Image (cartoon, rainbow, N blue to C red):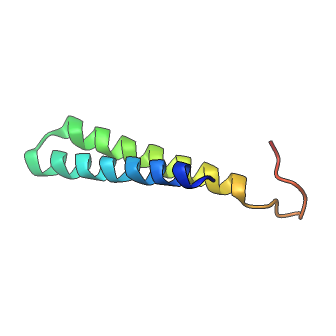
Amino acid sequence: MSVWGKAKAKAEELLGRAEQVYGESHGDAAAQVAGEAHVMEAEAEEEAFERQDRPAEDGGAPAR
């Protein structure tokens, strides 16, 4: 994973958390759900990048 990819995923996660907290504090269910969606999307993106960086468990090249 590139440095920029990691930074983008982390920024997306932080944006989602901020939106989620805003929704919770203002009683805005739509903002809360949208924030949760941003967080989940960013976590999935980070996990996908980590899978690309990790070598295969059998010692071979990663599958594409």
Q: Residue at x 87, y 54 (%)?
A: 61
Q: Position of residue 14 (x, y in %)?
A: 34, 53
Q: Residue at x 43, y 54 (%)?
A: 10
Residue furthest to the top in view is 30
Q: Is residue 60 above or below residue 4?
A: below
Q: Quadrant of residue 47?
A: bottom right
Q: Residue at x 54, y 46 (%)?
A: 45
Q: Position of residue 28 (x, y in %)?
A: 14, 39
Q: Position of residue 31 (x, y in %)?
A: 22, 39
12 relative to 31 in the view: left or right: right
Figure label count:
0
15 relative to 47 in the view: left or right: left
Q: Residue at x 56, y 55 (%)?
A: 3
59 relative to 22 in the view: left or right: right
Locate the C terminus and report the quarter of the image it occupies: top right
Q: Nearer the viewer, residue 7 or 61?
A: 7
Q: Nearer the viewer, residue 36 or 48?
A: 48
40 relative to 54 in the view: left or right: left
Q: Position of residue 9 (x, y in %)?
A: 47, 49
